[in-house]
C-alpha cells in the first residue's frame, strides 16, 4: 500500500494563502482566490429569471454563453441600493460552471500570508460561516476571505 501526498493548491505557498481579488460589498471588504476569477465586467443588462432565489438577479450573455448572475449584496442580506454606479460583475469559475457576481466595487489583488489570516469566529449552529476561509488584516482593514464554491453551493446549478 502506498501513501499519496496531496500538493497544496497552486495559489498557496508554504507561507501563505496566495493571491486574492479583494472587493467591496457596501463598506465591507471581501476576497476570493484569484484563480477563480475569469474576468471583471461593468454592470450590464441582466435578464431576470422568474421564480429564482432573490439573490439570483438573472443571466447575462457572455460571448454566447448564458451565465447566471448572483448579487452578493443581497446574498449577504445587504441593501443593493446606492452603489449601482460603481457596481461591477466579477465572472468566476465554480467547478465547471461560470457565474457572475455583482459586487459594489473591486479593490485590489493582494497576496495574503498565513500570518495575516485568522480563522473565522465561531457563532454556533445558527450562523453559517462554512464559506469563510479566514479573516485577513490588510491596510488596517479586515478582509473576509470567501470560499466561493461553498458560498454559492447549488444556488446557480439550475439557472445555467
Image: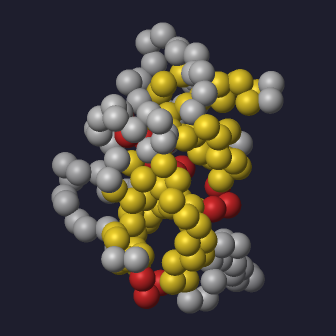
Q: Nearer the viewer, residue 18 or 28?
A: 28
Q: Quadrant of the N terminus?
A: bottom right
- Residue at horizontal 55%, vertical 83%? 16
**In the picture provided, is 151 more to the left or to the right than 41?**
left
- Residue at horizontal 63%, vertical 83%? 13
Q: Quadrant of the C terminus?
A: top right
Among all residues in the image, which is located at the extreme top? 50
**In the picture provided, is 18 more to the left or to the right than 54?**
right
Image coordinates of residue 35 in percent, x first then y, are: 67, 61
Residue 37 higher or lower than 83, as above or below: below
Among all residues in the image, which is located at the extreme right? 64
**In the picture provided, is 113 more to the left or to the right than 53?**
right
Residue 17 visible in the picture: no
* Rendered image quadrant of residue 122: bottom left
Q: Nearer the viewer, residue 158 or 109?
A: 109
Residue 72 higher or lower than 128, as above or below: above
Image coordinates of residue 155 in percent, x first then y, are: 48, 33
Residue 80 visible in the picture: yes
How many numbered discs sit on the rendered protein?
A: 0
- Residue at horizontal 33%, vertical 42%? 76
Image coordinates of residue 120 in percent, x first then y, are: 32, 68
Q: Nearer the viewer, residue 62 or 88?
A: 88
* Rendered image quadrant of residue 8: bottom right
- Residue at horizontal 48%, vertical 55%? 23
Q: Nearer the viewer, residue 87 or 66?
A: 87
Residue 29 higher or lower than 47, as above or below: below
Query: Colour scheme in the image?
Result: secondary structure
Image coordinates of residue 55 in percent, x first then y, are: 41, 30
Amino acid at each position: 500500500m502506498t501513501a499519496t501526498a496531496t500538493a497544496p493548491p497552486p495559489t498557496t505557498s508554504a507561507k501563505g494563502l496566495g493571491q486574492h481579488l479583494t472587493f467591496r460589498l457596501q463598506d465591507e471588504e471581501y476576497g476570493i482566490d484569484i484563480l477563480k476569477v475569469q474576468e471583471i465586467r461593468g454592470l450590464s443588462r441582466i435578464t431576470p429569471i422568474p421564480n429564482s432565489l432573490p439573490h439570483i438577479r438573472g443571466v447575462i450573455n457572455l460571448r454566447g454563453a448564458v451565465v447566471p448572475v448572483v448579487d452578493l449584496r443581497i446574498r449577504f442580506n445587504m441593501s443593493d441600493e446606492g452603489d449601482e454606479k460603481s457596481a461591477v460583475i466579477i465572472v468566476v469559475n465554480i467547478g465547471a460552471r461560470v457565474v457572475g457576481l455583482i459586487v459594489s466595487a473591486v479593490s485590489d489583488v493582494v497576496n495574503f500570508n498565513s500570518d495575516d489570516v485568522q480563522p473565522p469566529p465561531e457563532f454556533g449552529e445558527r450562523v453559517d460561516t462554512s464559506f469563510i476561509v479566514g479573516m485577513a488584516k490588510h491596510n488596517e482593514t479586515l478582509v473576509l476571505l470567501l470560499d466561493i464554491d461553498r458560498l454559492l453551493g447549488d444556488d446557480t446549478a439550475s439557472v445555467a
